[in-house]
Image (tube, rainbow, N blue to C red):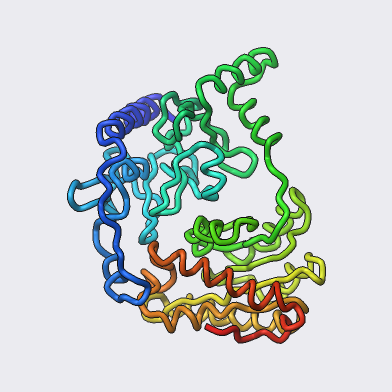
């Protein structure tokens, strides 16, 4: 980054820190109490303000906050630009930063808290440092006290940015000096050493699983949730391989994919990805749903094609069932905010529905799984 732009970015960060501490946690503005069946909530998501995001959280997203109205959806703080534009999950970034980095990151909710970083539940993001040229930030607003020293790593598994207490940072700095390394290197080393052993079912999904991940973790604590916005089915095999390499084979698998088109992906690719699992591993395939009235016909056609592949693969693989999310979403009007994603205040309903589908059809009754094409809604 050119020196002038780096200096500008640092001044912006300082300004943001000052603003954050002025507004503090902000006034808790009311969150919509509309139930899943109320159509008004879907229209509300298209307005310019998000009342469920507090002032301090809004600044952490890089967005501007208007007292009395809420967090502006499509307007960033001065010097920042729109980054994530999906309704209900808008966030900003600083220009000139490495691709994929913004004011927030898609870190799993539980892991975000374990890293002592602030989880912004209203938008399902973990607060991140927007300026990647500053390796260590003291008194960082992204941290949960008593941790206050933000250490930038790489925002990927095993090397997520982490917040340390001043005592921890001082101790690791002494270790780094003795080894001739850096505080960042020692923080990453400690993170890898302390990574817990994972044994349990795995969810591989796109933005729907990512948005409902914190709610799903509460109703299904043993679950590992690997959700990422925009994920395509072509990533399924790689995600399974990465999990198996690090943790061994999952005891079960939930696949929540098929909304984002992948032109070179076919039924045989889905079947091949599942063949990497032991034959008796239970698998739940969540049928995708896209409302044709709010999305391009090509996307809707793709999701319908993927629906057929999931049903076909489930019939041919023992211990495999489908969860008919398409039927459930279509029969519960107002559940979705944009024809694809569940409203924030209904993500708990989605999580409980997924948990029930697994418990009632895949886990307790494996002999029925090969026949289970049409779960109840």
Residue in the foreground of this view, choosing between 300 and 278: 278
Q: Quadrant of residue 278?
A: bottom right
Q: Position of residue 249 (x, y in %)?
A: 77, 58
The residue that appears at 60% across and 75% down in the rendered structure is: 357
In the drawing, does residue 298 fall left or right of residue 13?
right
Q: Position of residue 77 (x, y in %)?
A: 28, 41
Residue extending furthest left? 68
Q: Image height check: is 11 above or below 295?
A: above
Residue 152 makes an appearance in the image? yes
Q: Position of residue 49 (x, y in %)?
A: 25, 56
Q: Position of residue 138 (x, y in %)?
A: 44, 24
Residue in the foreground of this view, choosing between 84 and 329: 329
The residue that appears at 74% across and 48% down in the rendered structure is: 246
Looking at the rendering, in which quadrant would you find the N terminus?
Answer: top left
The residue that appears at 66% across and 78% down in the rendered structure is: 361
The residue that appears at 40% across and 28% down in the rendered structure is: 6
In the drawing, does residue 40 fall left or right of residue 294?
left
Residue in the foreground of this view, choosing between 269 and 307: 307
Residue in the foreground of this view, choosing between 136 and 122: 122
Q: Quadrant of residue 337?
A: bottom left
Q: Image height check: is 242 above or below 307?
A: above
């Amino acid at each position: 980054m050119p020196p002038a732009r780096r200096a500008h970015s640092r001044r912006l960060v300082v300004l943001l820190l000052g603003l954050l501490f002025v507004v503090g946690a902000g006034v808790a503005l009311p969150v919509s109490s509309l139930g899943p069946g109320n159509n008004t909530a879907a229209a509300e998501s298209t307005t310019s303000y998000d009342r469920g995001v507090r002032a301090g959280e809004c600044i952490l997203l890089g967005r501007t906050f208007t007292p009395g109205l809420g967090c502006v959806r499509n307007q960033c703080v001065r010097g920042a630009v729109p980054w994530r534009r999906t309704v209900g999950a808008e966030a900003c970034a600083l220009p000139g930063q490495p691709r994929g980095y913004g004011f927030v990151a898609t870190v799993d909710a539980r892991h975000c808290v374990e890293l002592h970083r602030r989880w912004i539940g209203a938008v399902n993001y973990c607060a991140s440092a927007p300026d990647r040229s500053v390796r260590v930030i003291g008194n960082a607003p992204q941290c949960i006290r008593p941790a206050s020293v933000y250490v930038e790593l790489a925002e990927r598994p095993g090397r997520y940015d982490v917040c340390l207490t001043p005592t921890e940072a001082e101790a690791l700095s002494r270790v780094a000096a003795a080894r001739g390394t850096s505080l960042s290197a020692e923080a990453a080393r400690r993170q890898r050493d302390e990574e817990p052993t994972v044994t349990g079912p795995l969810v591989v999904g796109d933005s729907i699983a990512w948005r409902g991940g914190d709610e799903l973790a509460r109703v299904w604590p043993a679950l590992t949730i690997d959700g990422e916005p925009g994920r395509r089915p072509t990533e399924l095999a790689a995600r399974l391989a990465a999990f198996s390499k690090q943790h061994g084979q999952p005891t079960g698998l939930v696949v929540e994919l098929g909304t984002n088109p992948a032109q070179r992906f076919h039924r045989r690719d889905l079947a091949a990805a599942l063949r990497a699992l032991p034959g008796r591993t239970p698998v739940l395939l969540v049928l995708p749903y896209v409302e044709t009235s709010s999305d391009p016909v090509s996307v809707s056609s793709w999701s319908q094609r993927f629906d057929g592949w999931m049903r076909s693969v489930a019939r041919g693989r023992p211990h495999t069932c489908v969860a008919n999310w398409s039927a459930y979403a279509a029969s519960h009007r107002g559940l979705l905010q944009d024809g694809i994603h569940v409203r924030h205040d209904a993500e708990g309903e989605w999580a409980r529905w997924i948990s029930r589908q697994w418990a009632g059809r895949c886990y307790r009754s494996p002999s029925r799984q090969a026949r289970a094409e049409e779960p109840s809604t």
